[in-house]
Amino acid sequence: MSTVTGTPGTRPSRGPLTDLLTGGGRSRRVLWLVLAVLVLVSAVRVISGEEALTSSSTIAAALLLAVPIALAALGGLFSERAGVVNIGLDGMMILGTWGAGWAGYQWGWGAAVVGGLVFGAAGGLLHAMATVTFGVDHVVSGVAINILAMGIVRFLSELIYIDNPAGGGAGQSPPLSSQPPEFSLPVLSSGPDLLGSLEERGWFLISDLAGLLRGLTSDVGVLTVVAVLMIPAAYLLLWRTAFGLRLRSCGENPAAADSLGVPVYRLKYIAVVISGALSGLGGVFLVFIANIYREGQVGGRGFIGLAALIFGNWRPGGLAAGAGLFGFSDALQLRSRTAVVALFLLVAVLLAVVAVMQARRGSYLPATIAGVFAVAALIGFLTIQQLPAGIVFFTPHLTTLLVLSLASQRLRPPKADGLVYRRGEH
Amino acid sequence: MSRLRRAGLALFGPALAIVVALVAFLIVIALIGKDPINALRVVTDLGDTPSQQTQSIVVILNRAVPLFLAGLAVSIAFRMGLFNIGVEGQYRLATIMAAAAGAAVALPAPLHVLLIIVVAMLVGALWAGIVAVLKVTRGVSEVISSIMLNFVALGLASFLLTGPFLGSGAGASIVTTKTIPESGWFPGLNGVLTGLGLAEPRSELYGFLLVAIVVGVLTAVLLKRTRFGFDLRATGLSPSAARASGVDARGMVVKTMLLSGAVAGLIGLPELLGDAHEFGTEFTAGLGFLGIAVALLGRNSPLGIAVAALLFAFLDRAALPLQFADIPSSVVTIIQGTIVLAVVIANEIARRLALRSAERAASSATSPPADGAGGGGGGTPPDGGPDGGRRAGTPVAGEQQGAQA
């Protein structure tokens, strides 16, 4: 255990400070990156005076908005790791919202969860039947499910909610009969509320950290905690168990998996049904936020979940980061239109860093482009007071796109993702 | 005889799909306790008087034109293996820009219309071009970037509509851009209809139908008869093989997306130039997403897309009469989804049947194949390769051989 220094392959020590900064491999680098982002955001908050940037209410809203997207992305993870592309996430999420609304108004929040899971899973089952049993092109099936889901929920609503004594109509359900429970961490966020008082001091970094922690620990729904825990759970299930290895082998090389006795068809079925159930659960969260099922509630979040999945390189940690980024910028634009302007400063700093790095590497054209945009963003920050509503609306989408185009792209989808596997035809 | 069977198998797919969709429709109607036969009559009944019938035909055609253009835009990218999910944003942004440009200038009629079309195509192409540039230079997946740009386009459009391009008065319930002057309107085709001896319909048949046909033919020629089209299809079938034969993959991505976006820019124009003459909150939305379904249903061939667009438009027309007959009009959406799914499943079953019969024929015939009447049939290179229809391979190839002999 203790003789790590002697093993071949590790680099020679370059002094304690360098080791601290660059050693330790991937996880250490991620840690530093997170810290750097925190310091940067904190600095931007102090300079621009936009407290909403790291306030606990923003963070709490971000968590609430990120969870449905993360669940959809998690659904996509199961499906695509088993080799089935799932464009139908959005449709399954729509089915989930309807199921949650229908079961929730009659029997309360527990039934809403079950209803959402079952309806989502039904969508997944349809996708599995089409793609695995009938070998249909995965994109076609997914698109068809998106259309079907929209038709089915509208149809069912017209059938059940019109003239329903409990309320509702062609576009919405009656309100849920009970709300899921919430809790706050004692001492830290409730009672004496240590974090809250720290947050109000406005200290550089410390108050930001307090805001972040308080947002994550006060008034958190029990289900939110469960949903967040599902991300490490999915990692353990897919990467640390035999079941997970077999499931992923279906997405990498189904023929080889089949030859080793892995039940490819069955595993694909299981994966896609889980995928539908998780997207449906994402829909349940949307229903909980509004306390009602409403048509158009999903608003393309299934597609954004898909984007988060690709953003995260088909890995649980990555998709959580993608969903978190999206949720944060979405919360920011919802809470404060002026705080979005502060993001310009953030972008300016980031682009300036990119410009310097590119220039040092000797690629002057990208450096110039990044520099020009950095200056433009800085000017934007200094001159614009408040952005119009239409522009602010797409902050999260543009942020995701910006981060994607700045980050290095070393994506590796599962090798057999989207390919139709027929036993004996390969 | 085997040729007959092949043709039968090729027709089997669509026929089965129609039967499945029909059965699904009847079951759904029966489930809600209505008379299925009556519902079917409502869907297929175009009207009692000649004028009503022409009116229905005009409604169907007017709906089919934008659907066709949307399907075409999606299919161009699909042929190359790119999934342009961003057609929705491309056409919305292009339409509002074109509406604003058209309202801002006054030109002689043909030039005015031309200007609006050019602006729409340019905006659509540029918006799709962002996706291509991000993919080529930064490796961003076109699926993510086009989804995100959809939202950006919708936000921009709503900002432009309520801000710089606002034309309707304050307090109006429907917010619109300024109206395009009459020189920028596209003449309708009702003269042609009455010339054909049909009754005068209530609404105007979009003259843009002709433009859509021209665009469809041009696209078909471009994809089938030019070097560019060959490169595009080859890259879609096998990127590595295309690159090995000297196709500039990055350049192809940019060109294909520009082309797809330019066609996407046209989607809103039939309505803008033929009917609405302004862009507003009531402007038809969702055509880009329906275009994906239409393209897939039409198997990415311009002719197939036209058929699929007509089918979707036919079903969409039934929504209103169904509502009058006290049947939820959302049945139409369910049927559309079922058809998309049923067609591909039926095609797959047909393909498997064809494969099985071919295998049986191969195992039974130890002598040279009996139907090689043209001679040298065994030595022909495998066709179906550059046809683009991977899954359609067997039936299509069968038809072609049949046509040769």
Image (spheres, coloured by chain):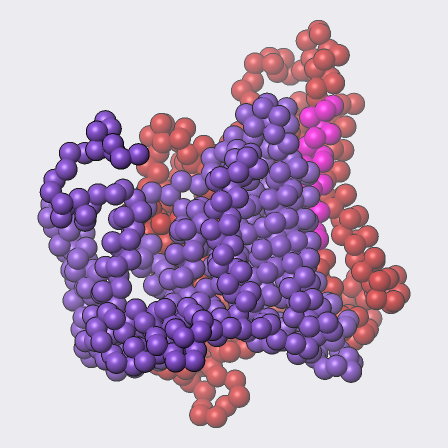
Chain colours: A purple, B red
Left or right: A293, with B266 as reference point: right
Residue at x 67% of width, y 61% of height: A114
Name the one closer to the observer, B211 or B152: B152
The percent position of residue B295, horizontal first and vertical second, equals 57, 50
Instruction: State which quarter of the image contains the C terminus of chain A.
Output: top right
Q: What stretch is highlighted in magenta?
A: B336-357
Instruction: State which quarter of the image contains the N terminus of chain A.
Output: top left
Left or right: B40, with B392 as reference point: right
Q: Can residue B274 be seen in this view?
A: no
Residue at x 35% of width, y 58% of height: A401
Residue at x 68% of width, y 77% of height: A177
Name the one closer to the observer, A39 or A162: A39
Q: Is residue A7 above or below residue B58?
A: above
Q: In this view, does B378 lie above or below B138?
A: above
Q: Is residue B28 magenta?
A: no
Name the one closer to the observer, A203 or B239: A203
Q: Does the magenta stretch include residue B338?
A: yes
Left or right: A248, with B12 as reference point: left
